[in-house]
Image (cartoon, coloured by chain):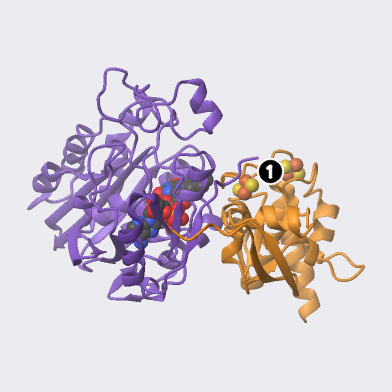
Chain colours: A purple, B orange
Amino acid sequence: MLRLPWFEYRSPRSVAEAVKILAGEGPQAMLVAGGTDLLPNMKRRHQSPKVLVSLRAVDELRKLNGSYGAGLTLAEVVAHPGTPGALRHAAAQVATAQIRNMGTLGGNLCLDTRCTYYNQTEEWRKAIDYCLKKDGSVCWVATASKRCVAVSSTDTAPALIALDAKVTLVGPGGEREIPVESLYNNDGIDYLSRKPDEVLSAIVIPSSWKSVYWKLRRRGSFDFPLLGVAAALKMDGDVVADARIALGAVASRPFRIEKAGEFLKGKRLTDEVIAEAATLVANRAKPMDNTDMDLYWRKEVADDFAGYALKELRGDDMGAIRLRTARYLPG
Amino acid sequence: MAAIPERVHLTMQVNGEAAPVSFAPYKTLLEVLREDLGLTGTKHGCELGECGACTVLVDGQPVLSCLALALECGGRAIETIEGVQRGPELHPLQAAFADCGGSQCGYCTPGVIMTAKALLARNPAPTRDEIREATAGNLCRCTGYQQITEAIESAATLLRAERT
Ligand SMILES: Cc1cc2nc3c(=O)[nH]c(=O)nc-3n(C[C@H](O)[C@H](O)[C@H](O)COP(=O)(O)OP(=O)(O)OC[C@H]3O[C@@H](n4cnc5c(N)ncnc54)[C@H](O)[C@@H]3O)c2cc1C
Ligand code: FES
Ligand code: FES
């Protein structure tokens, strides 16, 4: 049996009240939204917060007007007709239907980093003397590494980075808005720039981009990304006016590949241009051997996936490849 | 810090009946259903969200009871496999699973049936692809899924016939 540890449960009604509880309780408190990441982690004793601050009764986090409330479920984000392509593709491919009914957009952005030596039960981790990320001193993926290399595994973050989205963080001193990319540090342990007493309240997405998200995983459901490629374009006729490409699941943070975006500007999306942009993207994909599938394969297909994303944006019918690689067809 | 309460008392609506229950605050909905309410039809698989065996309906939506905090379920409508049959009669989904071989060892079956029930409530005539998509969060180690898809398809036909 994997029981949850004991905790004190708090259920604030507003963001302000949640922030107040976080500020008062300090690091022993943690937010819980859908619980689909935090509760499995608590069962494996990755986190054992003394106080759980639930966002479930905070109605203001469930708003969808202009911005996306952090408390919307992934199923709600997928169902919303105005959700841009990349975000819809990403949210629709998270986990399973049941989990998308429970898990929230805010929880997905704040998802803990993952690693084969970390996402294991307490007994398993104890048997290897734990690891750098939690309770141990060695990173078993790269034993010489001083830094934890656990992988950022959120599907929606690269999509939102490509879409040039911003998140709002509310803390005791007020509100701040930052680009989604700045929410992340390239550190498997300290992976968020969010302060412990801040609540991520909303996501603002400019509507002017045409965008897609491609995900590599073993099975057509359940699996976390082993590679995520998000691409967003603004077109001027058949010439690229602006381009943003982001990668997920190849480092401790999702990040944008500025060079590829710059390269595409002012060009037509010919096969040659797409191939060269895809190479620029793949050059930045340097995953570590700490997820499912061969490391070799995850590197090998990075340029293919970047190419698929750009071809789909060009208007090619990529349905067959979507089905073959991820068993997903955007509706 | 306030002391952690020993037990939580609340009332859930379980299969249409008010179910007052008292449990330790760290318990999941799965644990409360099985251990405190004696409803062992809902199965306990991976406990980590990775199999779907524990799927129940909360306010009509399929969710994983192993990842739901029971103390967040006060006042909510919970539907489990025990509430599916119609008096002494099997629900068409149950009958179809038996007839089509959609259930072998049976461990995944309660979760699949609850998922399918929610699907048919919102889409009475799903295509095979829609059935596969809706049940993609329920692992089955026996049937190979084909019989599950056929059972849901056949139950959908039965349920549509009932409505007309
Ligand atoms: C079997 C399985 C498969 C999965 N597959 C995927 C996948 O393919 N892709 C993927 O991206 N995820 C996957 N997940 C992870 C998870 O289900 C999703 O990321 C989900 O969106 C998390 O949202 P939540 O509301 O459940 O988060 P919670 O578990 O409630 O919270 C996650 C973290 O975010 C923090 N948090 C939550 N809300 C806020 C907020 N508003 N402000 C600040 N901090 C907050 C919490 O403190 C916690 O640290 C999977 C999970 C499981 C169990
Ligand atoms: S027991 Fe809940 S998903 Fe496996
Ligand atoms: S019938 Fe045995 S797991 Fe599905």
Q: Determine whether, in the image, residue A98 is placed left or right of residue A27.
A: right
Q: Give the answer, above or below, for where A37 lies relative to A70.
A: above
- The residue lying furthest to the top in this view is A144
Q: Determine whether, in the image, residue A322 is placed left or right of residue A220.
A: left
Question: Does the residue tagged 1 have its C-beta within 8 Å of any atom of ligand 3?
Answer: yes
Q: Give neighbour class at mark 1: few <14, some 14-19, many 20+ (Cα, 10 Å).
A: many
Q: Quadrant of residue A123?
A: top right
Q: Position of residue B116 (x, y in %)?
A: 68, 61
Q: Residue at x 69, y 63 (%)?
A: B22
Question: Quadrant where the C terminus of chain B lies?
Answer: bottom right
Q: Residue at x 34, y 50 (%)?
A: A27
Q: Is residue A109 visible?
A: yes
Q: Amino acid at mark 1?
A: Cys
Which chain is mark 1 on? B
Q: Give the answer, above or below, for where B55 lies relative to B12.
A: above
Q: Determine whether, in the image, residue A264 is placed left or right of residue A325.
A: left
Q: Give the answer, above or below, for where A171 lies relative to A67.
A: above
Q: Determine whether, in the image, residue A125 is placed left or right of residue A107.
A: right
Q: Position of residue A273 (x, y in %)?
A: 15, 42
Q: Position of residue A311 (x, y in %)?
A: 27, 48
**How many numbered marks appear?**
1
Per the image, label 1 sits on a secondary structure element best described as loop
Q: Residue at x 52, y 32 (%)?
A: A122
A161 or A49: nearer the viewer: A49
Query: Which residue is under mark 1?
Result: B140
Q: Quadrant of residue A167?
A: bottom left
Q: Position of residue A293 (x, y in %)?
A: 44, 29
Q: Residue at x 22, y 49 (%)?
A: A193
B133 or B51: nearer the viewer: B51
Q: Is residue B125 visible?
A: no
Question: Quadrant where the N terminus of chain B lies?
Answer: bottom left
A40 or A280: nearer the viewer: A40
